[in-house]
Image (cartoon, rainbow, N blue to C red):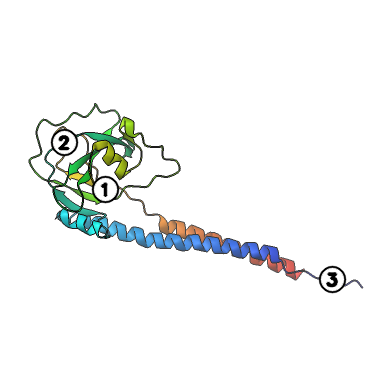
Amino acid sequence: MTAAPHRRFPIGLTVFTVIALAVLCGLGTWQVQRLHWKEALLAHIAALRTAPARPLDGPLAALASGGDADFTRVSADCPDLEQRPYLKLYAVWDGQAGSRIIAACPLKSGPYGSLLVDRGFLPQTAPALAPSAAPLSEPVTGVLRHGDKKTFVTPDNQPAQRQFYYRDVAAMAAVLGAPRPAPIFLMLEKPAPKAGLPLPAPIPPDIPNRHLEYAITWFGLAAALLGVYLASLWRRLAK
């Protein structure tokens, strides 16, 4: 009588499964962490919508000392903002292509000499932006924001043409002749320009939060992989 062949434990399959499970669970855990971060960010933005504006000096001083001023509403004196030179930052707002108008606001005190101001969105089909004939009669109010980093699909900036595709404070400040710029942007809320453009757009109208869905997907794939592995192991060893 011939003895049943000995079934070897699938070491290779087991190693692959363990590595794959570690990767999938790691991705799921990362998405859970991102979920907590996004929920805190959305709560902060919700509170920001009714928060009073603070004088600019305090947040910039905190920023210079290593603090974080992101998503802080501030006010600043910049009466000639609509008369100053500007450059364009390519952007898409509410499904429409165009540019965000970036100008520099000189600072008379504090750790920095200037602050870049994002005046808002100008549609691609809009006519060229003309300087205002009169200075602003009130301080500007807006939200301090750090710029998005360049990705592998972002085109290179074109400083010579005053055309930018990602926020580079140093390069933008050099084009605008702005000394010692603060490493942050003021996203203008008001006053809105009398002509209606550029459209102040400080905060995206809809910030997606699908991290829970992504976490469930990664953990679900991990569970499915574990189930397939256990079923395969049972069939192999049961023969």
Please indicate, yes or no, whether residue 228 appears anywhere in the rendered image: no
User: Does residue 3 appear to the left or right of 31 in the view shown?
Assistant: right
Which residue type does callout 1 highlight?
Ile
Question: On the rendered image, what quadrant is the C terminus found in?
Answer: bottom right
Residue at image mark 3? 4
Which residue type does callout 2 highlight?
Glu
Q: Quadrant of residue 227?
A: bottom right
* Rendered position, 10 above or below 191: below
**Label 1: element kind:** loop
User: Does residue 44 appear to the left or right of 26 in the view shown?
Assistant: left
Q: Quadrant of residue 2?
A: bottom right
Which residue type does callout 3 highlight?
Ala
x and y, in percent, of residue 198 in the image: 22, 35
Q: Nearer the viewer, mark 2 or mark 3?
A: 2
* Rendered position, 6 above or below 179: below
User: Does residue 135 appear to the left or right of 28 in the view shown?
Assistant: left
Residue at image mark 2? 82
User: Does residue 93 appear to the left or right of 9 in the view shown?
Assistant: left
Residue at image mark 1? 203
Residue at position x 37%, y 37% in the image: 157
**Label 3: element kind:** loop
x and y, in percent, of residue 204 in the image: 29, 46
Q: Earlier in the sequence, mark 2 or mark 1?
A: 2
Q: Earlier in the sequence, mark 2 or mark 3?
A: 3
Sort mark 3 into few (<14), some (14-19) or many (20+) by Cα contacts within 10 Å.
few
Q: Quadrant of residue 124?
A: top left
Outermost residue toward the right in this view = 1
Question: On the rendered image, what quadrant is the N terminus found in?
Answer: bottom right
**Label 2: element kind:** helix
Residues tagged 2 and 3 counted as in contact (Cβ below 8 A) = no
* Rendered position, 66 above or below 122: below
Q: Earlier in the sequence, mark 1 or mark 3?
A: 3
